[in-house]
Image (cartoon, rainbow, N blue to C red):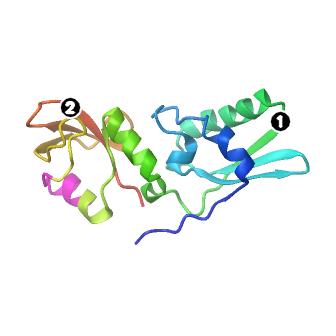
Amino acid sequence: MKIELEQHIAPQLISVLEKIHDPEIPVLSIMDMGVVRFAQIVDGIVQVKITPTYSGCPAMDVVGDDIVKEFKKQDIEANVSLVLSPAWTTDWITPKGRKALEAYGIAAPLEEILDKEALLENKKIVKCPQCTSTNTKMISQFGSTACKALFKCENCLEPFDYFKCLK
């Protein structure tokens, strides 16, 4: 089941928010990740609400600081707050973001049922971002970050991260 993405983002703020990248996956903007829930100008101050990709994600402090800094470059004051509900889901990663992940060498998340089959049943369904083969094998439940698993392609022999499905 897909969760509808409810965002309230003023169009004139999007270009600034697209300049801010996820510190753990620099090819993705925070807009590509779908973490920006609200961005409006209220009484002359940009108010931004972001949802962490998982509870306690250390990157959110950096993202918040980066938002404030990016607006400050425009001589605009900004405040950032966290929104915890609804919880972030990998469904919120944009199609552009999914393509950027794969171009960067990280396999994009599968749907929830397929994700469980790949991670728990070791089914060969995670596509290698280098050669597109599904002849892949999980090496570790955890990759470079907790939200990723480490896989290896048995065709091209390259290791790669798989971004786990989070719901």
Q: Position of residue 33 (x, y in %)?
A: 50, 47
Q: Which residue is mark 1?
A: 76
Q: Residue at left 43%, top 69%?
A: 2
Residue 79 percent across, percent down from the top left: 78, 43
In-front residue for pair 20/118: 20
Residue type indicated by callout 1:
Ile
Q: Residue at x 51, y 46 (%)?
A: 32
Left or right of 26, for residue 124: left
* x and y percentages locating residue 59 in the rendered image: 55, 36
| Residue 13 location (% of width, % of height) | 72, 45
Mark 2 neighbour class, 10 Å CA radius: few under 14, some 14 to 19, many 20 or more? many
Residue 114, quarter of the rendered image: bottom left
Q: Quadrant of residue 167?
A: bottom left
Furthest residue in direction top, as rendered: 73
Number of the label disc, if any, that sits on residue 159: 2
Name the N-terminal-most of marks 1 and 2: 1
Kindly identify the amino acid type of the residue bearing the numbered disc 2: Pro
Residue 125 in the image: above or below residue 131 = below
Q: How many discs appear? A: 2
Give the side of residue 136 with respect to residue 28, left or right: left
Q: Which residues are magenta?
A: 116-124
Circle 1 packing at 10 Å, graded few (<14), some (14-19), many (20+), is: some
